[in-house]
Image: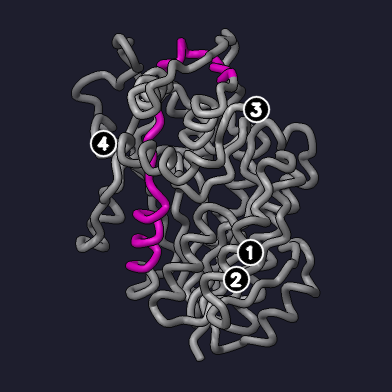
């Protein structure tokens, strides 16, 4: 028996990983206790995704309602499957800047402590299994905001000819900048994943994601940019824009493209690998541009409200470079761009995201 163990298995990337690796013939063990509902409220709950996974996959999927902070509970799962674990995909996290400020203890315990718990269990019970860690571009803090930008009609853009014109690389420093509480906890997790790779010789990868997105996102105001844009449009909610004239740029990568990168690493793992992984130049948008695409798809105008102050640590412009990953895994290709992503989100939720009566 070969097992793929997925933490955060009911979330966007976790659930996509569950389905994908089950499709490869692995038995999938999922760990998810729906902390997202605690973080963001009932509308962000992932319980629906657990029901869908268990229904779709049957005996190929085993779900454990366990908190990754629970060392004893986690250890029992790893002990049970031991050397049968062929890959560990760690997507469980507290994902919000704003929420982290309200409860930094929980944020750090989940993001840093939970990641350490996963790594140590892999070391003790399944040391040959590659560990794929969902990190974040927020490990770079607000350093991207120090880059030279030009204001265009609908977006900020990096100065032509800059070394990062085709995307920010992994050589950007993470030091001497503001990270946010969330960013700091993710830095701790990211470095620990690298350290277990170097110190213990484990196969580990940190994937520093940009905007990860797709139709399985339980989109809410504090997390899930493109999904929440479309949800606001469809449900006739007011979308609050925080600073930068709504011209801040995000690269967006579909969960399908993320998981295909994970599979590539699983089949040919390295130790202590670090990769930026996002939409890159292939798939990126400003808020204003995302509003316009959504309006074309639905035929409805966005309802927006502008606030001058940007969120602390928020990026004015982020387009990451996938060049390092593509160098190591040249067969990996992106499929989705922003219009395709927003169209799919709309089609997946057209019967669910309707205006309140």
| C-alpha span from label 3 to label 2 | 30 Å
Q: Are marks 1 and 2 in contact (CB under 8 Å)?
A: yes
**Horizontal arrangement in the rendering, residue 100 relative to residue 22 (left or right):** right
Q: Residue at x 78, y 47 (%)?
A: 106
Under tag 3, what secondary structure? loop
Q: Earlier in the sequence, mark 3 or mark 2?
A: 2
Q: Position of residue 36 (x, y in %)?
A: 69, 48
* Number of the label disc, if any, that sits on residue 356: 3
Q: Residue at x 33, y 36 (%)?
A: 338
Q: Position of residue 327 (x, y in %)?
A: 23, 57
Q: Position of residue 222 (x, y in %)?
A: 62, 32
Q: Are marks 3 and 1 in contact (CB under 8 Å)?
A: no
Question: Compared with residue 246, is residue 189 higher up or lower down, i.e. above or below?
Answer: below
| Occupied quadrant, residue 270 | bottom left
Under tag 4, what secondary structure? helix
Under tag 1, what secondary structure? helix
Q: Residue at x 68, y 48 (%)?
A: 45
Q: Which stretch did the figure color magenta?
A: 238-264
| C-alpha span from label 1 to label 4 | 36 Å
Q: Residue at x 57, y 8 (%)?
A: 308
Q: Earlier in the sequence, mark 2 or mark 4?
A: 2
Nearest the viewer among 255 and 84 is 255
For the question of whether residue 141 can be seen, the reply is no
Identify the residue under disc 2.
Answer: 54
Q: Are marks 1 and 4 in contact (CB under 8 Å)?
A: no
For the question of whether residue 119 can be seen, the reply is yes
Tell me the mark number nearer the camera, choosing from 2 and 4.
2
| C-alpha span from label 3 to label 4 | 37 Å
Identify the residue under disc 4.
Answer: 281
Identify the residue under disc 1.
Answer: 51
């Amino acid at each position: 028996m070969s097992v793929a163990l997925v933490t955060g298995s009911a979330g966007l990337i976790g659930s996509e990983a569950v389905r994908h690796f089950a499709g490869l013939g692995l038995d999938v063990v999922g760990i998810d206790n729906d902390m997202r509902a605690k973080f963001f409220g009932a509308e962000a709950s992932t319980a629906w995704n657990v029901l869908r996974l268990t229904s779709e996959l049957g005996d190929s999927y085993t779900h454990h309602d366990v908190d990754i902070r629970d060392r004893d509970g986690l250890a029992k799962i790893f002990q049970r499957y031991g050397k049968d674990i062929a890959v560990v995909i760690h997507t469980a996290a507290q994902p919000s800047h704003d929420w982290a400020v309200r409860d930094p203890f929980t944020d750090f315990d989940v993001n840093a402590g939970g990641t350490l718990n996963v790594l140590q269990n892999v070391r003790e019970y399944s040391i040959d299994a590659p560990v794929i860690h969902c990190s974040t571009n927020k490990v770079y803090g607000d350093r991207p905001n120090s880059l030279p930008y030009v204001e265009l009609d609908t977006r900020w853009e990096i100065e032509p000819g800059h070394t990062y014109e085709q995307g920010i690389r992994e050589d950007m420093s993470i030091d001497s900048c503001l990270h946010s509480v969330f960013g700091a906890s993710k830095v701790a997790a990211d470095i620990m994943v690298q350290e277990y790779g170097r110190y213990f010789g484990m196969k580990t990868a940190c994937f520093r994601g940009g905007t990860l997105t797709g139709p399985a996102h339980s989109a809410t105001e504090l997390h899930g940019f493109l999904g929440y844009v479309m949800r606001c449009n469809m449900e006739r909610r007011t979308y609050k824009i925080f600073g930068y004239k709504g011209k801040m740029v995000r690269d967006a990568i579909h969960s399908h493209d993320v998981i295909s990168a994970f599979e590539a690493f699983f089949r040919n793992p390295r130790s202590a690998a670090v990769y930026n992984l996002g939409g890159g130049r292939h798939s990126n948008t400003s808020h204003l541009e995302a509003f316009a695409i959504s309006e074309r798809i639905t035929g409805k105008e966005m309802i927006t409200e502008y606030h001058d102050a940007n969120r602390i640590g928020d990026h004015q412009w982020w387009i990451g470079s996938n060049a390092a990953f593509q160098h190591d895994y040249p067969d990996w290709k992106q499929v989705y761009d922003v219009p395709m992503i927003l169209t799919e989100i709309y089609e997946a939720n057209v019967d669910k995201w309707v205006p309140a009566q």
